[in-house]
Amino acid sequence: MKYLIWLPLMLASTLPAQAVPRLYEQLASNGPPTPLQILRQVEQHYQHEGRIVEFELEVEKGVITYEISLARSDDNNFLELTLDASGKVLDREREPGEMDDESELEALAALEDQDWQVSQLVERAIGQQQGYLIEAQLEHNIGISYLEVELLTEKGKRKLAVDLATGEPLPILQWD
């Protein structure tokens, strides 16, 4: 039975179910930097280029990379970075915004209004839970700007959300 708690989010998975335990073990054995440390590193080194609007851990042939998009609300261009597992930049590209980026840009304005860093909001979303950040994305839906976070725990993936106006966790779509 389905229960809509409050805020509908698309819960599409990017990793096959069997890959989740392997990825968790790989992240646990890699040591620093963790995905959250990579996020903070990018925020610090690229703060003059914009704020993070999307962060995603990718795995291809067992190799971890990070795809990170930065933007400024006064500019319709995105800085797309690809980093290796150590945080070294592999690719850097400027791209113009597209129609589906409007949600991110609206949420970015809310993020800037409150002067949040994405890493602060990720930490608020995660709280005391143990796991690894695998995705974070600014969104604006049904009049609410929020950060959607995907956390990889020993038991699998978890979706979390934080309201950009308050910094408080938001209930999300849950399935029984």
Image (cartoon, rainbow, N blue to C red):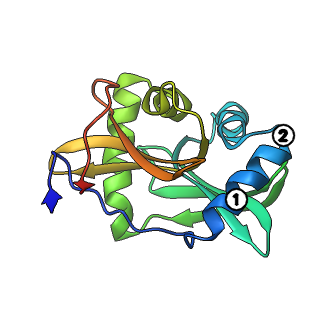
Q: Nearer the viewer, residue 50 or 56?
A: 56
Quarter the N terminus occupies: bottom left
In this rendering, would 31 be left or right of 160? right
In this rendering, would 46 be left or right of 146? right
Percent coordinates x, y for residue 72 in the rendering = 48, 44
Q: Is residue 99 in view from this perspective?
A: yes
> Which comes sooner in the sequence, label 1 or label 2?
1
Quarter the C terminus occupies: bottom left
Percent coordinates x, y for residue 111 in the rendering = 39, 33
Badge 2 marks a residue whose secondary structure is: loop
Q: Is residue 12 above or below residue 32?
A: below
Q: Is residue 14 above or below residue 157?
A: below
User: Amino acid under label 1?
Assistant: Leu
Residue 31's disc number: 2
Structural distance between the alpha carbons of marks 1 and 2: 13 Å
In this rendering, would 47 be left or right of 145? right
Give me the residue at 65% from left, 40% from top. 39
Q: Which residue is mark 1?
A: 23
Q: Nearer the viewer, residue 143 or 151?
A: 151
